[in-house]
Amino acid sequence: MKILFLSRLFYPHIGGVEKHVMEVGKKLVKMGYKVTVITEENGKREKVEGIEVYRIPLTTSEKFKKFQIWWWLWKNRNLIRQVDLVHAHDVGFWYFPFRFLFPKKPFYLTFHGYEQYPPTKRAILIRKISEKISFANICVGDYIPKWYGTKANCITYGGVEMLPILQTNTNNKNILFIGRLDEQTGIMTYLQAFKKYQLLATNYHLLILGDGPLKRKADNFIRNNKLEAKILGFVANPEKYLQEARFAFVSRYLSILEAMVGKRLVFATYDNPLKEDYLKLSPFSKQIVIEDSPEALYNKLVYYIQHPKEEKKKVEEAYNWAKEQTWEKMVNLYLKLWRAR
């Protein structure tokens, strides 16, 4: 079977969607499938982990970008013609014109996340059109049907590679943040909570793995408040830092899964009702700490530092769920979806 994935970004970019497409693609290649990815960037054609990658060169503004993408896809429509199916990751609109050019070509979608809160009417409309022209879809999270009105064929929360089994170590004095430095990941809420804790005790350190639009603001907050915190930027493999941490400050599914399978207690935060549902509608919501303010996060941080048995119980329950969410299971979900139509 020949499969074409459409994804706005792909390796070497670091992010949840990028890793999802890479891991699913790698596993499919090993199973004997031919996988091609079309993504944005610099016009290069290359092979990554056995995956054929075509990068669309973009030279226009964001407003007109879709027309340049459509034109490139038109000029390279043989890439669509020669595959058995097309599967878009969020960027369903890329395929709008070609759904009619190739009406019998199976077309599928994975909806990975949300654009902003509240979702705009335009964002909801584009998703509904994408859903209507697709054969079937996968939603990453139960909140998507609720907030976008999507009729999900499958619900998932991502995949994870099993790490060497770690044990909860209450002697570790590091807290690890993983994610983009933006509003959606709650970086400033975490920093404010850590500031309150540092006033109580100075033996903990916060390591921040990420980058983004709030990096300068976060860095200034760290310096101005003399926090024992350091921004290390994005790293491809955060596992070694996870081994040295006691807690994980993470609010996105992929990082949550990685922390859970690494046996680290997760502290997640939200600042709007959509993000609250993103976290609380998940099947692992009872196995992590979910709060909406620095004060609440601080109180739970103190509680679990003082109650290591409760910490261990929560961590073990989270691990037992997360260890079943392998990338092999994810690939089987895709294959089941494609074969069902």
Image (cartoon, rainbow, N blue to C red):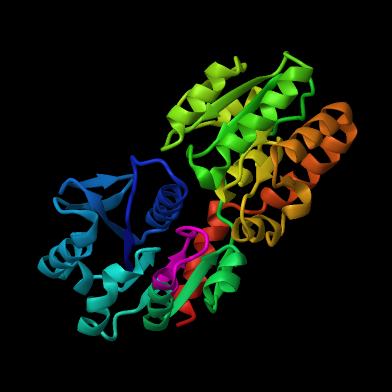
Give, as a single range, the part of the protein colored magenta: 109-124
Whether residue 287 is in magenta: the answer is: no
Which image quadrant for residue 185? Answer: top right
Q: What x and y, as percent, mark residue 209? A: 51, 30
Asked whether the viewer can see residue 319, the reply is yes
- Count the labels in the image: 0
Can you say whether 139 is above or below 183 in the image? below
Residue lying at 27% horizontally and 68% vertically, measured from the top left: 94
Quadrant showing the C terminus: bottom left
Q: Residue at x 83, y 36 (%)?
A: 312
Q: Of residues 59 and 325, which is closer to you in this image?
A: 59
Residue 80, how many percent across, how many down? Answer: 22, 70
| Observer-nearest of 77 and 143 | 143
x then y, percent, for residue 329? 57, 59
Which quadrant does the N terminus fall into?
A: bottom left
- Residue 272 x/y as whole percent: 61, 55
Relative to residue 48, is residue 336 drawn left or right? Answer: right
Q: Residue furthest left?
A: 75
219 relative to 106 in the view: left or right: right
Is the residue 7 above or below the residue 110 in the image? above
- Residue 121 lies in the magenta stretch: yes
Left or right of 217, for residue 51 = left
Which residue sits at x=72%, y=52%? 321
Q: Quarter-wise, where is residue 162 in the image?
A: top right
Tell me where residue 274 sits by quadrant.
bottom right
Tell me if residue 234 can be seen: no
